[in-house]
C-alpha cells in the first residue's frame, strides 16, 4: 500500500491568496465594468532593470554558440556571481563573508523552505506571528508540529509581533532551538535595530540555537542606522544563516535567483553535543537535490552589481518606496494606525474591524484589493497589509478611491 505523508493534512485547508482570488472574482462577476486595483499579493510590477536585460540577452547568445555554450554549472553558483555578492553586499559594508560562504539558488522561498531538512525532528521551533507562511508550512509537512488548533500548530513557539512591542518580538520564555526572523518584515513592514538583533544573537549563542534570517527586503532600507544583514552583529556568523533574493530589489520574481549565506563558523550540534559546521550540510543538500540556476539568469543577477545595475535597482526600489510613502500618508490621514512603509514596501494597517470585513469593505466601496492580516497569523487579526508594488498611477487612484469612500 502506498501510504501518503499525512502531515500534509494538518496544513490549513485554504490558502490565503486563493481565498482572496475567490472574493475578487465574485466581486468582478457582479460588477464587470468596475476596474480593480490590486495592492494585495507581494509581487513586483516593473520590468527588469536595463542592465540585467542586456546581460541576460548576451548570455542567451553565448548559449547559442558552440565556443561559448555552457552545460551544468557549479552547483553552488558561478564564482563570477558569488564574488560580486560577497564584495558588494557584505565586504563593502565591513562584513567578512567570502564567496565560498554563498550558495546561489532559484529562490529564497525554496531556501527558507528546504533548510529545515538539516535539522532533527526533536528541535523546538520559534515562529513569528504574523509570519511568511513558508516557514511554518514546511515544518508542518516535515512532521515537526502537532495539529492546528484555533489557527496555531501544537508544538511551535509563537513569537508575537504586536503594536505593544513595535512588531519586533521579545525573546521567548521557553527555550527554543531554531528561530525564524524576517526584517524588514513581511507582512508588517517593521524593521529591527542592531540592538534588537543583538539580543537574538546573544540568545542563540547562550542557548546553542540557530537563527534563520530572511533579508528579502534588505534593499528597501533607507535609514542608515538599520542593519542590512544579521552579520553586522558581532558573533552572528556562529549562530545565523541569512537568506537574500533578487526578487524584490531587481524584480526577479518571474526570473528566479536568490542566495543563502552560511558562514563557515556557523555551527549546529549532534545529539551527543559535538559541534558541527552547517555549511557542508547545506552544500550536500543543495548538490544532491539541486542542479544550479541557469547561466543567463546568473549573468542577469551579476549585472545588479554593475554601476548601471546598482543605479537602476535603486530607482526601482525608490519608485515602490514613493508608493509606500503615499499609502502611509493617506491611510494615516484617514485615521488608521500604520506601521511599515518607510524601509519596506508593505504598510500594516490596524482597524477596529475584523480583517476580512475591512478587506470586503475596501473591495466593495473602493475596488481595491489588500491582504487580510489574519491570513498571516493570529496576531494579524484586525490588520490588513497594503503593498506598494504597483504603478504610481494605480496607487494614487486607489488612495483617492479609499478617501472618497471614507471607509
Ligand atoms: C518575496 C519573499 C521572498 C523571496 O522569495 P523568492 O523565492 O526569492 O522569490 C522571501 N521571503 C519573504 C518573506 C518574501 O516576502
Image (tube, rainbow, N blue to C red):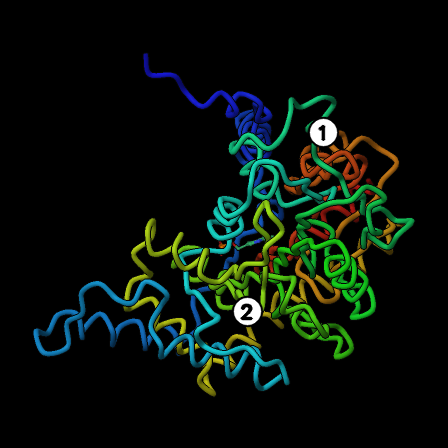
In which quadrant is the N terminus drawn? top left
Q: Label 1's element?
A: strand
Image height of 356 relative to 399, above or below: above
Which of the pair 347/163 is nearer the observer?
163
Ligand 1 within 8 Å of disc 1? The answer is no
Categorize mark 2 by other alpha carbons within 10 Å: few (<14), some (14-19), many (20+).
many
Q: Label 2's element?
A: loop
Tell me the quarter of the picture where residue 252 sits.
bottom left
x, y percent for residue 335: 90, 49
- Labels 1 and 2 touching (C-beta < 8 A): no
x, y percent for residue 310: 51, 81
Cα–Cα gap, marks 1 and 2: 33 Å
x, y percent for residue 200: 77, 59
Mark toward the viewer: 1 or 2: 2
Q: Which residue is under mark 2?
A: 263
In which quadrant is the C terminus drawn? top right
Categorize mark 1 by other alpha carbons within 10 Å: few (<14), some (14-19), many (20+).
some
Image height of 92 relative to 406, above or below: below
Which of the pair 154/57 is nearer the observer?
154
Residue at left offset 46%, top offset 49%: 110
Residue at left offset 54%, top offset 77%: 97
Q: Which residue is under mark 1?
A: 152
Numbered circles on residues, count: 2
x, y percent for residue 50: 40, 76
Extreme top residue here?
Answer: 1
Q: Could you tell whether 389 is left or right of 362 in the image?
A: left
Q: Which mark is residue 250?
A: none
Extreme front residue here?
Answer: 272
Q: Could you tell whether 295 is left or right of 46 in the image?
A: left
**Quadrant holding ligand 1?**
bottom right
Extreme left residue here?
Answer: 66
Amino acid at each position: 500500500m502506498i501510504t501518503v505523508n499525512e502531515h500534509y493534512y494538518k496544513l490549513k485547508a485554504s490558502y490565503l491568496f486563493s481565498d482572496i482570488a475567490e472574493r475578487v472574482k465574485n466581486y468582478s462577476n457582479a460588477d464587470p465594468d468596475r476596474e480593480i486595483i490590486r495592492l494585495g499579493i507581494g509581487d513586483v510590477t516593473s520590468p527588469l532593470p536595463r542592465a540585467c536585460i542586456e546581460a541576460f540577452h548576451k548570455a542567451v547568445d553565448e548559449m547559442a554558440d558552440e565556443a561559448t555554450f555552457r552545460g551544468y554549472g557549479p552547483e553552488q553558483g558561478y564564482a563570477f556571481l558569488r564574488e560580486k555578492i560577497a564584495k558588494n553586499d557584505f565586504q563593502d559594508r565591513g562584513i567578512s563573508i567570502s564567496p565560498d560562504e554563498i550558495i546561489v539558488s532559484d529562490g529564497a522561498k525554496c531556501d527558507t523552505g528546504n533548510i529545515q531538512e538539516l535539522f532533527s525532528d526533536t528541535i523546538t521551533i520559534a515562529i513569528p506571528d504574523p509570519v511568511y507562511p513558508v516557514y511554518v508550512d514546511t515544518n508542518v509537512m516535515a512532521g515537526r508540529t502537532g495539529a492546528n488548533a484555533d489557527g496555531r500548530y501544537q508544538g511551535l513557539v509563537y513569537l508575537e509581533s504586536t503594536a505593544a512591542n513595535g512588531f519586533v518580538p521579545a525573546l521567548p520564555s521557553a527555550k527554543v532551538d531554531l528561530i525564524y526572523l524576517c526584517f524588514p518584515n513581511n507582512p508588517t513592514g517593521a524593521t529591527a535595530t542592531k540592538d534588537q538583533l543583538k539580543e537574538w544573537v546573544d540568545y542563540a549563542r547562550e542557548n546553542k540555537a540557530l537563527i534563520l534570517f530572511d533579508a528579502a527586503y534588505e534593499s528597501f532600507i533607507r535609514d542608515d542606522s538599520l542593519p542590512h544583514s544579521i552579520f553586522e552583529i558581532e558573533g552572528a556568523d556562529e549562530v545565523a544563516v541569512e537568506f537574500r533574493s533578487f526578487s524584490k530589489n531587481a524584480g526577479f520574481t518571474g526570473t528566479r535567483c536568490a542566495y543563502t549565506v552560511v558562514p563557515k563558523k556557523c555551527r549546529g550540534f549532534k545529539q551527543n553535543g559535538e559541534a558541527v559546521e552547517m555549511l557542508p550540510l547545506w552544500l550536500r543538500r543543495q548538490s544532491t537535490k539541486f542542479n544550479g540556476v541557469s547561466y543567463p539568469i546568473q549573468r542577469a543577477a551579476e549585472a545588479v552589481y554593475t554601476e548601471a545595475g546598482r543605479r537602476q535597482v535603486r530607482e526601482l526600489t525608490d519608485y515602490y518606496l514613493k508608493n509606500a510613502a503615499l499609502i502611509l500618508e493617506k491611510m494615516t490621514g484617514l485615521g488608521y494606525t500604520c506601521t511599515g512603509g518607510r524601509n519596506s514596501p508593505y504598510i500594516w494597517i490596524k482597524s477596529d474591524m475584523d480583517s476580512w470585513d475591512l478587506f470586503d469593505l475596501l473591495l466593495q466601496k473602493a475596488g481595491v484589493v489588500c491582504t487580510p492580516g489574519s491570513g498571516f497569523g493570529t496576531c494579524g487579526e484586525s490588520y490588513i497589509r497594503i503593498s506598494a508594488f504597483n504603478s504610481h498611477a494605480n496607487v494614487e487612484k486607489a488612495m483617492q478611491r479609499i478617501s472618497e469612500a471614507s471607509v
